[in-house]
Image (spheres, grey):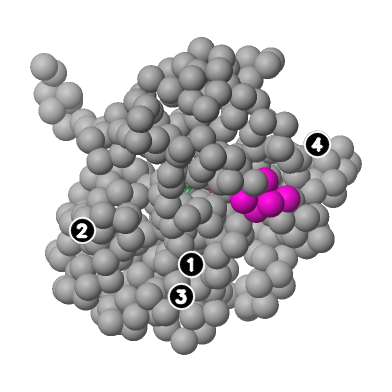
Amino acid sequence: MGQWEKNIRHVVPYVAGEQPNQPDMVKLNTNECPYPPAPGVAKVIKEMDSDRFRLYPDPEAAELVNAIAEFYQVSPENVFVGVGSDDVIANAFMTFFNSDKPVLFPDITYSFYPVWADLYKISYETPALDPDFRIKKEDYMKENGGIIFPNPNAPTALFEPLDTIEEIVKNNQSSVVMIDEAYIDFGGESALRLTEKYENLLVIQTFSKSRSMAGMRIGFAIGNEKLIRAMKDVKYSINSYTMNRTAIAAGVAAIKDREYFEKITHKIVETREKTKVKLKELGFSFPESMANFIFATHPDHDMTELFEYLRSKHIYVRHWNQPAIRDYLRITIGTEEEMERLLQAIKEYGIC
Ligand code: PMP
């Protein structure tokens, strides 16, 4: 081994869901939105003046920050934007999880958290969820270097009520608590208003799910001005120009169309509720989903096998080969037609 190899920063990277590309596929594996972005997005992209690409974009992405601030009725000083919420969370880990005490997140959660923690050499503990996959708030009432979990949680889709969130934030005022609200727009109640009351709370959201923009990569955090300033200082120490001109313009168009946003999120919730009924009829069970996916299991069937069967039919759902969740499939809510094709394939497999 060469001397230089000894100094490599070794990491085990996060593995994203596969991105297959069959023409006939039903893609329900990465929690994308089945509907196009707001119509204004296509319009601004068509009208984009590529001559402007000669120039660097605004490092503050002020237009987008202002539009997000207006939508959520906060001040622009309370908003941080990044290249998807993954970028925002990575930045927040680096900025705030910086003590010698362990950071806390649940054992079953977004599997990117331990990857960032390892990358930045942050120690962490992973309190176990209860047998119903609920967060036990008592586990978060001890000394720590920070706390993060999604609400609703992923991949369980379970939503924790706001008073649980408030209790955790209130009892941890010496560390930063991050609530990852990637899936909040599908029926949950955001902790956003609590950021006015608690300066240690950072709420993170994304345009990838409820605004149909996973491919454009836009995420944001809302929190106290001091938190946001600290995140910007770290960001400007790595790369000032993360938000490109197209993403800024498309993001503004997306967030300005409240009516379209409400229409598609409502439609997804409606399809989710119908799908829950049909899956139950087939004998599946699942934690009560408040997200754009369902985490389903079946007492009589092997989910690894069903996953492979669906895959062979070009119907993609997500499965993890980990002991605690091996018996589950995470199924993204697609269009009504896509869910019908999924249910049909499940019946053809032999679950009826
Ligand atoms: N948080 C959670 C809980 C997620 O499931 C995802 C999607 N993989 C993200 C954050 C990141 O989403 P994005 O980077 O597309 O905003």
Residue denoted by label 2: 127
Rendered position, 267 above or below 54: below
Query: Quick one: label 4, few (<14), some, or many (20+) residues within 10 Å?
Result: few
Residue denoted by label 1: 203
Of the residues shown, which amino acid type is indicated by label 2?
A: Pro
Q: Earlier in the sequence, mark 1 or mark 4?
A: 4
Of the residues shown, which amino acid type is indicated by label 3?
A: Leu
Residue drawn at 17 percent across, 24 percent down: 5
Q: Quick check: is the Cβ at mark 4 less than 8 Å away from ligand 1?
A: no
In the rendering, at what x and y percent does residue 249 appear? 75, 51
Q: Tag 4's secondary structure?
A: helix
Distance from disc 2 to disc 1, alpha carbons, whole Å, reads 21 Å
Distance from disc 1 to disc 3, alpha carbons, whole Å, reads 13 Å
Q: Tag 1's secondary structure?
A: strand
Q: Which of marks 2 and 1 is nearer the N terminus?
A: 2
Query: Quick one: label 3, few (<14), some, or many (20+) residues within 10 Å?
Result: some
Of the residues shown, which amino acid type is indicated by label 4?
A: Ser
Q: Which of marks 2 and 4 is nearer the N terminus?
A: 4
Residue denoted by label 3: 162
Q: Is label 1 or label 3 in front?
A: 3
The magenta-colored residue range is 267-273
Of the residues shown, which amino acid type is indicated by label 1?
A: Val
In the rendering, at what x and y percent does residue 92 appear? 39, 60
Q: Is label 4 or label 3 in front?
A: 3
Is the C-beta separation of discs 2 and 3 under 8 Å? no
Residue denoted by label 4: 50
Rendered position, 51 above or below 234: above
Q: Which of marks 4 and 3 is nearer the N terminus?
A: 4
**Overall secondary structure of the magenta stretch?**
helix
Query: Quick one: label 2, few (<14), some, or many (20+) residues within 10 Å?
Result: some
